[in-house]
Structures are given as C-alpha cells and as structure tokens.
C-alpha cells in the first residue's frame, strides 16, 4: 500500500482516541496523539511540560495575538508569542512523523497540515451527547455535571484551536473525508468502516 | 432485516442523489427525492406545482414568519402561511412513506422528521468544491461561473431550510451518523460504505 496518513479529529468523549489506536494496530502503523509532544520536545528543544500546557489549546490571549499580527503587518516586527512557538513545534512534529511514513495522528490539525500529501484520509469521530457524558464519567471518574461542563469546554477549545490554525471549520462534514458517529454502531464498527474506506481504491 | 430508513442529506453537486438511488437499488428499497412531492400532493390535495415551488426552500418571508410566530404567541391567532402549508404536506408525506416500511429518502429534513424511528441511518454526502462544479457543469450544462453561483445559492438555501425546520445544523458531522466526501473514493465506494454501515449490527 502507498503511504497513508490517517488523521482523526474527534469530539471529546467520542471514542476517537480508542478508534485511532485500533486502526493503527490493525494496519501496523505508528499512532500519535500525546506522543507528538515527545517528538516536538525532542526536535524543538522546548520542554515537554511547556508544550503540554499549549497542547491543542487556543491562544490564551486571542486579542493580543490579533494585535500582534496587526503590528507585524504594520511594522514588520518579528514578535513571536509563546503560543506561536509551541504551535510551530507541534506543526514541525506532525510533518516530521509523516516524513517517516504511514501513520495515524489524532488531533493537532494534522488533517490540515498534511493536506498536500496524496495518501491523506481525514476522519472525524463524533458521538451522541449522552453517550459522550457516559464515557467521560466512566473514564475520568467524573459526575455527569462535571462531564457535561468538560464536554462543552473541550468542544469549544478544540473548535477554536482548529479555527485559529486552519481556514476550515472543525466538525463540519466538508472538512473531512469520512465522519462517523461512534454511538450508532460502536467503536469496533467505526474501526472496520475506516479500514474499509482506506482500502477502497 | 428490521425496518431501515436511510436519509441522505447532501451538498448540491456532491452526487448524493445518485448515491441514494444506488443504495436503494442495492437494498431493494423504494427511493424518494422529488417523488415525495407526488405523495404530498396526493395526500394533501395541494397541487404538485404549488408544492414544488416551496420544495426545500426556506420561507420567502423569514421576518414575516417570525412576526407571525410572535403574534401567534401573543394573541393565540391561528395564522398559517403558505410556506407552513407546503412544509406540513412535506412532513406528512415523509411520515407516510416511512409508515409503509424501509426506504431511502433524500433531503426534506427526513433525518429530523424520522428521528424517533429505531431503524434510522442519517447519511450526509459532501464533495470537494472543484468536483462539485465539474459535476454541475456536466449535468446541467452550465458554465463554471454559473455552477459556482448555483452551488453557493443551493448550499445557503438548504442550510437555511434545514435550520428553519429542525434544531440541528445542516452539514455538521454531529447531525448525522455517517458523512462521506464522495470525491475521495468516488460514488460507488460511498455506496458500498453506506451498505456496510447499514449491515453492521
């Protein structure tokens, strides 16, 4: 098989990570999620802890960045925020692991970063609201109320991070090649559907 | 197989209609697209021509309808606009064909209308912008510029119609069970993926 890059965007609590891992296992591909932080840390010289604090989070100072961008346009000044530094290390890590060959990458705008590679398959996993709450309660030991707050926060955070670093809309069907609601038929069914899609000529 | 209702939302020029027809043929299900108008006309007594002029079009007088809705709340008046009459006939036609058993329905908010039926599979078909233009030029004999204008208008119209009649977002992955970009692997691959999804336990 030619080189294949499967990127997985996912709603928080949708099972996207589990699905990504299983797809990677089935294909014998390396899997990158938090693992990208180690790559980014090693290659950029920035600390793992520093990178983790900016991982998939939109800039803490959105208006500040806008202003900085504006100043750059006006003055040509080369101000680089810490968020930009972390995002650049992440971007380079995504390209670096893709340069090594076929892989599965979860999140981190990898679908957008790898958009010019022929073997790209862009997947998005979502799930029913109540199933997501159940999953997060079970996995992270939260109350339903805490899980609900976290879902809302994480959806907002991911959409905002994605919107900031791409010109596409996070979670819109047209941003991806294949979107699956994992609540309908379950995680394993989603895995086999992705494998089927990848194998199609 | 238990009763199965496959609804297909689609971007204009994405091949959604062709995909829906092929899925219906493969499963031996009746297929409804424009065919719903005949059902609606027969059951409502409204003319086919009248229904067609409101088919999947948002109300022509959005603010008027808002005001009417407001007046209804305030006064309890039973004002029914012609758009509401057409939409009601459409809704009743969707339920009526579903009452007869398994089927494939393209558009008309059928995914939302049938949301309480257990055998519902909600599909959305999108495609790359340039592939959509190609398809519309070829199919409707338009220039690329005309096709582009029509794509933008139809996307807006469908999103607006859907948003007006449901509480969900047209084209958002989380609105559906399965979304496929038909440009990636083609129409037949999309058909076989939908069949695979439907067959999954």
Image: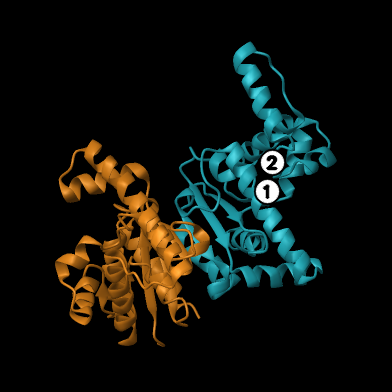
Chain colours: A cyan, B orange
Disc 1/disc 2 C-alpha distance (Å): 6 Å
Q: Can residue A136 be seen in this view?
A: yes
Answer whether labels 1 and 2 touch (C-beta < 8 Å).
yes
Please state the horizontal and vertical placement of residue A117, each as a whole percent of the image.
49, 40
Quarter where residue B159 is shown = bottom left
Read off the chain for label 2: A
Quarter where residue B149 is shown = top left
Q: Tell me the residue at 32%/69% (across/down).
A: B80
The residue wearing badge 2 is A58
Q: Locate residue B49 relative to residue A123 in the image: left or right.
A: left
Q: Residue A157 carries which label?
A: 1
Q: Are marks 1 and 2 on the same chain?
A: yes
Read off the chain for label 1: A
Q: How crowded is mark 1: few (under 14 residues within 10 Å), some or many (20 or more)?
A: some
Please state the horizontal and vertical placement of residue B19, each as a whole percent of the image.
30, 64
Q: Residue furthest top?
A: A75
Q: Which mark is residue B166?
A: none
Residue B32 vs residue A21, the one in the foreground: B32
- Say what secondary structure mark 1 lies in: helix
Q: Which of marks 1 and 2 is nearer the N terminus?
A: 2
Please state the horizontal and vertical placement of residue B173, each as a whole percent of the image.
50, 59
Above or below: residue A16 compared with residue B137: below
Q: Tell me the residue at 33%/53% (across/down).
A: B157
- Say what secondary structure mark 2 lies in: loop
Residue B129 vs residue B155, the one in the foreground: B155
Q: Is residue A201 visible?
A: no
């Amino acid at each position: 098989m030619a080189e294949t890059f499967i990127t997985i965007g996912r709603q928080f609590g949708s099972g996207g990570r589990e699905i990504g891992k299983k797809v990677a296992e089935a294909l014998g591909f390396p899997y990158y999620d938090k693992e990208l932080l180690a790559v980014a840390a090693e290659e950029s010289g920035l600390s793992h802890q520093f990178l983790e604090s900016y991982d998939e989070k939109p800039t803490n100072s959105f208006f500040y960045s806008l202003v900085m961008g504006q100043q750059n346009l006006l003055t040509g000044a080369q101000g680089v925020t810490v968020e930009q530094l972390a995002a650049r290390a992440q971007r380079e890590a995504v390209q670096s692991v893709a340069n090594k060959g076929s892989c599965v990458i979860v999140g981190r705008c990898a679908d957008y970063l790898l958009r010019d590679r022929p073997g790209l398959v862009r997947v998005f996993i979502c799930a029913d609201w109540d199933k997501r709450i159940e999953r997060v309660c079970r996995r992270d030991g939260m109350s339903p109320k805490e899980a609900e707050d976290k879902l809302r926060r994480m959806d907002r955070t991911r959409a905002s991070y994605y919107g900031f670093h791409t010109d596409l809309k996070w979670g819109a069907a047209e941003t991806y090649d294949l979107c699956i609601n994992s609540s309908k038929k379950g995680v394993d069914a989603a895995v086999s559907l992705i494998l089927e899609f990848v194998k199609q000529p």
